Amino acid sequence: MRKKALFIDPGRCIGCQACVAACRECDSHKGRSMIHLDYVDPGNSAAAMPTVCMHCSDPVAPCAQVCPVDAIPVGNDGVVGTASPELCIGCGNCVHACPFGVPKLDVPEMLQYKCDLCYDRSSQGLLPMCASVCPTDALFYGTFDELQAKRPSAKAVDVFDFGNQSVVTGNALVAPAGAEDVIPGGYSVWNEFLETPA
Amino acid sequence: MKKPLQILAPGVAAFRKESSRPGNYVSEERGETMVATHCCYCGVQCGMYLRVSAEGKVFGVEPRNHDINKLKLCPKGVTAYQQVNHQDRLTKPLMRDRREDPLREVTWDQALDRVVSEIRRIQAAYGNDAFAVYSGSSLATEKCYLMGKFARVALATKHIDYNGRLCMVSAAAANKKAFGVDRAANPWSDMLEADVIMLLGANVGECFPVATQYFWGARDRGAKLITVDPRETPIARTADIHVPLRPGTDAAFCNGVLHVIEREGLIDEGFIRSRTTGWDALKAVLPFYTPEKVGEICGLDPALIEKVGLTWGRAGKAMAFHARGIEHHIQGVDNCLSVINLCLATGQFGAPGKGYGTITGQGNGQGGREHGQKSDQLPGQRMIEDPAAREHICRVWGITDEELPRAGTSAVEMVHQAEAGEIKGWLGICNNPMVSMPSAGRIAGGFDCLEFHCQIDFFLSETCNRADVVLPGTSWAEDEGISTNAEGRVIKYNKASEPPGDAKPDWWIVCEIARRLGHHADKFQFASSRELFEELRVASKGGQADYSGITYERIEETGGIFWPCPSEDHPGTPRLFEERFHHPDGLARFHAIEWRPPAESVSRKYPMWLTTGRTVAHYLSGNQTRRIDALVQQTPRPWVEVHPSLGYKNGDPVKVTSPRGSATYPALVVSTIREDTVFIPYHWAGKVAANLMTIDALDPTSKIPEFKVCACRVELGTEIDVPPAPPVPPGGQVYPEVGVFDKLQPSAPQGRGTGRG
């Protein structure tokens, strides 16, 4: 669990793709976006949702665990990096292992790409590009307290059940006020885990 | 696994090659500097930093924590910097001798001599007014000021107008009538205190994405949001009340809401008595507008009108905002006045949480219309037929009253005058009427009748591409100058790099034409934007839009200064109308508005309503955004949005026909649009231009075209029309041929998703 995390609120996403455009501007992977932006119910709704890396903390990074060459670094601060190009063999294990469908494989290059929380920025106190530009704070970066100061009724969800496997994530989804079990299989252990060192 | 399909706009391949490989991209540019500036696109005018390399090349963007946007940017803002070094930039003057010839590169002397000799020839043969100037509001205010002065002093022509005529001029006229001044009443931060916000004809999530934080900031604090739009747009999706009315019925709706408020005794009688006039006349028209009657006109459940009336009427503090959706009508001015009536009747002015505003569509939509490039205005929002205003400006400019032309005609009228042979020569800057004007077929015909056409731009627009002379100007990043955002806040663009090749600052080009013409050449000896700004300050002094106390330095020291700002120790005026309105008696005016039907009604032959608008990835005529990689990938082409009840499938070729033209688009089938209405985004040119179908009927006061409603029919077509590539200068690489992929509709109105598939 990260003290400062990305809080993703699909209810606030207007589908503008500013995050996608901004992700391309990150110095470490300029020209390439790591964000999946889906129009979730096209035809019936203008609803949209960005999917970024959740930086799984328990179990730690399934993508890194299955990597046969240990190409995906996981930092002490809980940030799961993009695969190191020197090591990555483009096998795609991480793509299959990720419960959220985050890593992308560039087949011609035989390299994996995924969000590293703009490590060059976030490790220096800057916001990740996506959360910096998001016009509506559908992607919000900060502490849970900072989120609640802006949105007093916001609830964060950071545990997700996949069959018999629960995954605790470093980033969180925001659930609508007053709604229980809104995110299928998702619930919050935010307060219990908040102070646990990563 | 199949190879991912990619669409590359010109310039994209180079971007990719340079920068898309993480392995060889150098993340720390040596000697990088960051230039604090603002976005060039919409009326929000978000702050941003441009990243500049040691060699002086703009190569990236960094979010800026400016008071307006607080780091946030939309996809257009994030990628705006990619225009600066784009391979499509115009770097040499271009000319052709006959219409049939291709454009060729020439020297500045050759191009300017031709422009000057044609101006002289046309004005000698047909009179001064036979030469027209058509300007734009995406220019910095200094240049807008210069264009007005250039037309009236150097050319002595009355024919000068600007592209705000296609944008927010209805709101401008309504504001003048009701308040005596044309400006939004409040800073947007006032929204955070509102109990109810009503948003009419404004697709904020797509056209002003970063402004969404103010609307939702209010909602996070408990406010209710009401949206009024024929389409359920991204901001309407989660609104507390969404009113999906029929296009062209806004005034009836507002009257219906006011009917309910008045019936329930929810008007603010004290405010009406002490601060307004004209209530009785308005009250007399309200009985007709019962919720039942209005429901019939607007195609709405009467209960919805009751609900809006009670929600607004019972609000302690309420604010209303609108955009082009209610302004692009033959009763655009009346539509805006009907919203103002609602705010006045309930006393919603002059305090945090209480107010009204239009959201300007162009970056400098507000500032661009204040300093004399409007056909009937002089600098400082002065009216050109006002003797005192003429006297002041003649003194500043050093000319006589006889020399100063009278009011001219509006943008679309000028093209129609060209068609009629009254206007023979044309100088255009910062606009693309081939894409942006209504009934596009007739517009092209009008330009064909001109004997000479010169266009100034930094990309070769569709309009440049048919001009006789094209002069390469600068992008917003290559010059300094001020802009006024939708709030009335004056901000400043800063120079980040030199113009490419032989391109020149726009003010230099225009002044050079004036100097070579020789008529009052001494009045155009400007050597910088700053010198123009200093004269603008003097010219605006004492006018409604008084900028005289604003300096470049003060703008940099603050988050921008709201006009009026009459002296250098004046803090500016973020909130208007706290004590009085700007009419001489200090009172606001009610207007007794009656709803009138649109210029064209549906019929058996044309049974559907057609409405047009923007999508988030593109801006105005698309001359800038149709060339940017990320934006083209997000939304490569236009579509027609149809309701499922019409029976089409996504991607079907659907032919849209109005009495003026037709085009075939892929269908985007959505239940978020009215059954009786279809929508087409207007950013594209040629065979897929939405304006082939729109009507050129004009509002009698504002002369704004009725872009937002006309009649059409839709039917299953055969072949989907392919968008033409954006024009490139001679020798330039042409946009790659668009393939099968490009015929598909986007996955949603906001574009194509980047997730699966």
Image: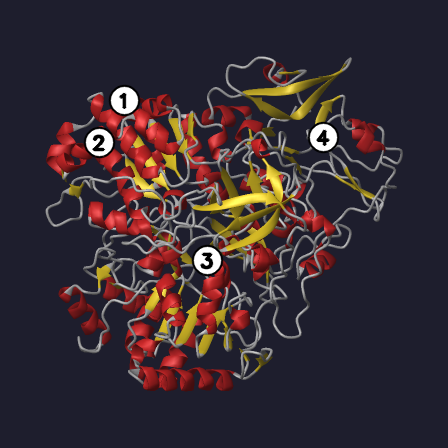
Q: Quadrant of the N terminus of chain A?
A: top right
Question: Which label's residue is closer to the chain start, 2 or 3?
Answer: 2
Cα distance in 3D space between marks 4 and 3: 63 Å
Kind of residue sitting beneath label 1:
Arg
Give the letter of the chain under mark 3: B
Cα distance in 3D space between marks 4 and 1: 55 Å
Residue of label 2: B286
Kind of residue sitting beneath label 4:
Asn
Q: Residues within 10 Å of mark 4 (few under 14, many from 20)?
A: few
Q: B459 above or below A72? A: below
As rendered, which of B178 and B609 lies closer to the eye? B609
Question: Which label's residue is closer to the chain start, 2 or 1?
Answer: 2
Q: What residue lies at 17% left-to-right and 42% top-to-bottom?
A: B588
Lateral position of residue A14 relative to residue A38, left or right = left
Q: Is residue B134 visible?
A: yes
Residue of label 4: A76
Kind of residue sitting beneath label 3:
Ser
